[in-house]
Amino acid sequence: MKTISFSAVIGTLLSLCCLAGLSSCASMDASNQEALLSAAGFRVKTPSTPQQQAAYAAAPSYKVHRATVNGRTFYAYKDEDKGVAYVGGDDEYQRYQQLAIQKKIAQDNYSAAQMNQAAAMNWYGAWGYGGYRYGAPGRFWW
């Protein structure tokens, strides 16, 4: 009978958890970007004509790209899963950039607050329990 080592099982479980976490982050990023685009004023369009469908097929997925048609500049974001494109002009794109910067600043502030809280929680544990064993006064740790 073949035995499986404990470390192999733990390694497999950890790798599966990491893969699940990374896949959820990717979908979360796409939905966050779509929310930013909608908040900035981008309009959701479904390609209906053959020209629109050809342009949609050639566009990169999940990335805002710039295009110029008949001297007009616009920005588009292709959501391949839903089969739609978010389309906006220069004003909407500038608003999108502002919202993205504000979101980044908010995330950085939140991360810093979490790190400060974690550091404050570890501060009290750095000194131990006064040098005594818990529940046995007079007996030192060392």
Image: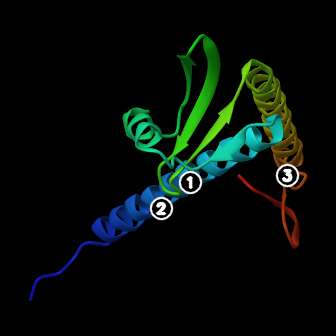
Q: Which mark is residue 27?
A: 1
Position of residue 53 in the picture relative to residue 71 (left or right):
left
Disc 2 element: helix
Tell me how far mark 3 sits from mark 1, CA to CA.
49 Å
- Identified by mark 2, the residue type is Ala
Kindly state the secondary structure of the residue where label 3 is placed: loop
* Residue under the point 49% across and 56% down: 81
The relative height of residue 57 versus residue 93 in the rendered view (above or below) is below
Coloring basis for residues = rainbow
**Which residue lies under the disc numbered 3?**
131
Which residue is more in the foreground, 101 or 59? 59
Which residue shows up at 90% across the image and 52% down it?
Answer: 130
Q: Secondary structure at mark 1?
A: helix
Residue type at numbered disc 3: Gly
Q: Tell me which residue sits at (60%, 47%) in the image.
A: 30
Q: Which residue is mark 2?
A: 20
